Amino acid sequence: MVARPIVVAPVTGLLLGEPQAGMLAGVLLEILSLHQLPIGANRHWDTGPAAVAAAVAMVAVRGPVGLVVAGGAGVLIGWLGSWSVHGLRHLNARLVVVDEGPGLRPASLTARHLAAIALDFARAVTLTLLAVWVVLRGTEGIAGAPAEAGWVAALVAAALGGLALGADVRMVAGGRRVWTAFGIGSVLSTIVWVWLH
Amino acid sequence: MFEMLARSLLIQGSWNYRTMQGAGVGFALIPVLKRLHRDDPDALARAVRRHVGFYNGHPYLSTVAIAALARMEGEEADAEEIDRFKRALVSPLGSLGDRLVWARWRPLTLLLAALLYLAGAAWWVAASAFLLLYNVVHLKLRVWGLRLGWREGRAVGRVLIGSPLRRLPDRLTIPLAAIAGGLLPLMALSVSQSNGLAPLPAVGSAVGLAAIGAWRPALAGRLAAFGILLFSLGFVILGQIAW
């Protein structure tokens, strides 16, 4: 679980000199991707490369506009990653599924299994490098966004983050007790925040 | 046992649409099979072949199946029985692991880490808290599964039905909801604070849309992702032509 945005994004930010910015992007991407459960043969987002893309975008653009662009970059790369994993799963079937013969040597199975892991590593590295290149090219010129764009972006990040969080909770749980607990949590954290600020 | 545990960490390494984790199960069982068939390479090859068929349970609870299969192999179970046993374990191990880990423990620890950060903890404290909390339970589940599977062998399915782990997801639901609720205003407030936006519209829009998200979760999840992608593309285009 080191490939979660809440770990990868601040570490990427740290490498770029701004771990706090990376962490903010990681939190937003976690909220957006939490409902993507790797159940059965579900094709879920590849959050590792997505988190790198989000952190790079956040550091490149900064502020609320940077946060929205980080979220968008994360969603795009996460989605592309899910399709690359889908392709790899088909390739793995050719690599490791043995239909012929009564036996399979352990060395052969080990080689096939490790080759599949190496292919996945190569896929993730390629996707990450591609993501960084796309984000750096795409964010040229956004850093000078006017203040009004910042307000819009802050409102968009808060609203869409809220939309995703409500969906996340409802996807994994439901019922009156759940929403009561959700409400109590909201009120308590608001009180703590007001008290601290 | 330790070698099986270590290899179980790679069980999804060759996940595919035909046998799913089948090759991973065979890979994890190789040390045991080598020990059982050390004098007969043909018997070893046949044993490896027996274990690479279809299997897809929760990866953390795969140790239950792997250890039980190792014990059955030692008791010279035939290929048909092994295949039947593996298929019978897919549903109980899958549903228990999916509900407990993917739908409760992982979101709970991730949201807790996010809450810690937005409440003022250092980024590395929040990230480390997630890694530590999550993986303590993750590794404990793997070790528990290995011991259970080895002890019970082919009777492990019966023991799983009465396992106290089955009630754990329900107990984690309320803490998960409370943490998510706590995160909602903090997320909106920290975003608004960073740009001088008044707190009320940010919190109000977050709470309002969270209610819509709870009403239509499948659509809302997609809409949030698509919406942020659309706005970010808008900013990128504006950045290129206007700013």
Image (tube, coloured by chain):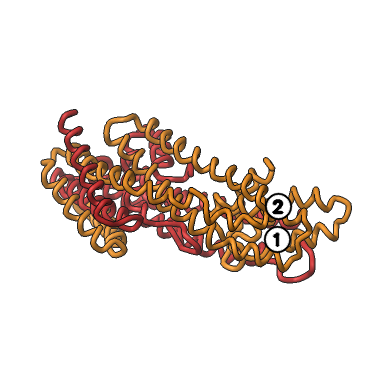
Chain colours: A red, B orange
The answer to which quarter of the image holds residue B20 is bottom right
Q: Chain of mark 1?
A: B
* Category of crowding for the residue at label 1, using alpha-carbon neighbours closer than 10 angstroms: few (below 14), some (14–19), many (at least 20): many
- Three-letter amino acid code at disc 2? Leu
Q: Please tell me if label 2 and label 1 are on a single chain.
A: yes
The answer to which quarter of the image holds residue B220 is bottom left
Picture coordinates of residue A97, whole percent (x, y): 67, 66
CB of mark 2 within 8 Å of CB of mark 1? yes
Q: Secondary structure at mark 2?
A: helix
Picture coordinates of residue B60, whole percent (x, y): 55, 49
Q: Is residue A37 left or right of residue B71?
A: left
* Category of crowding for the residue at label 2, using alpha-carbon neighbours closer than 10 angstroms: few (below 14), some (14–19), many (at least 20): many
- Three-letter amino acid code at disc 1? His
On screen, residue B29 above or below B185: below
Residue at image point 39% right, 37% down: A10
Q: Is residue A119 left or right of residue A147?
A: right
Q: Quadrant of the N terminus of chain B?
A: top right
Picture coordinates of residue B184, whole percent (x, y): 24, 45
On screen, residue B90 above or below A169: below
Check disc 1 and report the residue beneath it. Answer: B51
Picture coordinates of residue B167, whole percent (x, y): 43, 51
Q: Chain of mark 2?
A: B
Can residue A56 be seen in the rendering of this structure?
no
Check disc 2 and report the residue beneath it. Answer: B29
| Mark 2 and mark 1: Cα distance apart in space | 8 Å
Residue at image point 45% right, 51% down: B100
Can residue A149 be seen in the rendering of this structure?
yes
Q: Which mark is residue B91?
A: none
